Amino acid sequence: MVSPAFPGMFFAFAGMALLVFVSVSPPAWDQVNFLDARAGGQHTVFGVLGECIVGGACSTRNVGYDLMLNGATNANINPTGLHNLTYILILHPIAGFFGLLALIMGIIGVVGASRFSTILMSIFSFIAAVLTLIVFVIDMVLWNLVKKRINDAGYSAVLGNANWLTIGAFGAFALATCTSLCGACGRFATGRSAGEKY
């Protein structure tokens, strides 16, 4: 019989994995990004901790960073308000950490047939879901404002795949919360000889 904690554990793993991909966005990996901009022959991508010129140099890793459009001469995309929003991007890995805690509790719930661990998994999944939803809303505000400024200056910018991975992670954590809460009400058996734990 499949453990009642298994569905929650699966969705917690899915949400955590998606946020791992988001968290290693530029300057670590330019294939996952929040905004993809082109100006003056330069292709710039923006991530959680910095930005990169595709095929070129990257900024240093910082919590909160200056938004610079390489190759642009007349685009002001780094006013104080937008710069300050980049500090909040650190919520992506923080939410991923709570997803990891939910996954660990889920593994204990499955392997150890523990109702308490399944309840903790639902709590950590809920915290991860709330943090992910908050940071997704901030992503949409920040990157749409930056995109508009770039496009208004006559350059090109489109939203990147990290935004959609973030909303996918929110969905996974929401499902993990629901399924682990339902699973906590299920039967936890450790084997025929050991009987059932309630």
Image (tube, rainbow, N blue to C red):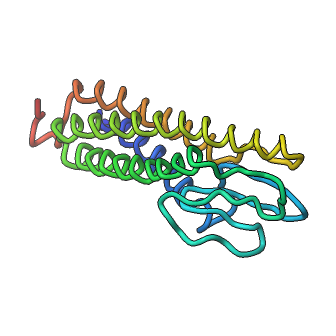
Instruction: Determine whether, in the image, residue 62 is placed left or right of residue 162.
Output: left
Looking at the rendered structure, the number of numbered marks drawn on it comes to 0
Up/down of 154 relative to 127, above or below: below
Q: In which quarter of the image is residue 45?
A: bottom right
Q: Quadrant of residue 159?
A: top right
Instruction: Determine whether, in the image, residue 10 is placed left or right of residue 167.
Output: left
Which of 38 and 69 lies nearest the eye of the viewer? 69
Q: In which quarter of the image is the N terminus?
A: top left
x then y, percent, for residue 22: 56, 53
x then y, percent, for residue 70: 78, 64
Which of 93 and 68 lies nearest the eye of the viewer? 68
Which of 122 and 115 lies nearest the eye of the viewer? 122
Q: Which residue is drawn at the image coordinates 56% and 60% (left, top)?
A: 65
Up/down of 198 relative to 44, above or below: above
Q: Which residue is drawn at the image coordinates 85% and 46% (left, top)?
A: 153
Instruction: Determine whether, in the image, residue 123 is placed left or right of residue 60.
Output: left
Q: Which residue is drawn at the image coordinates 36% and 42% (left, top)?
A: 9
Q: Quadrant of residue 11?
A: top left
x then y, percent, for residue 98: 34, 47
Q: Which residue is drawn at the image coordinates 69% and 66% (left, top)?
A: 52
Up/down of 65 relative to 131, above or below: below
Instruction: Determine whether, in the image, residue 23 is placed left or right of residue 73.
Output: left
Q: Which residue lies furthest to the bottom in this view?
A: 57
Q: In which quarter of the image is the C terminus?
A: top left
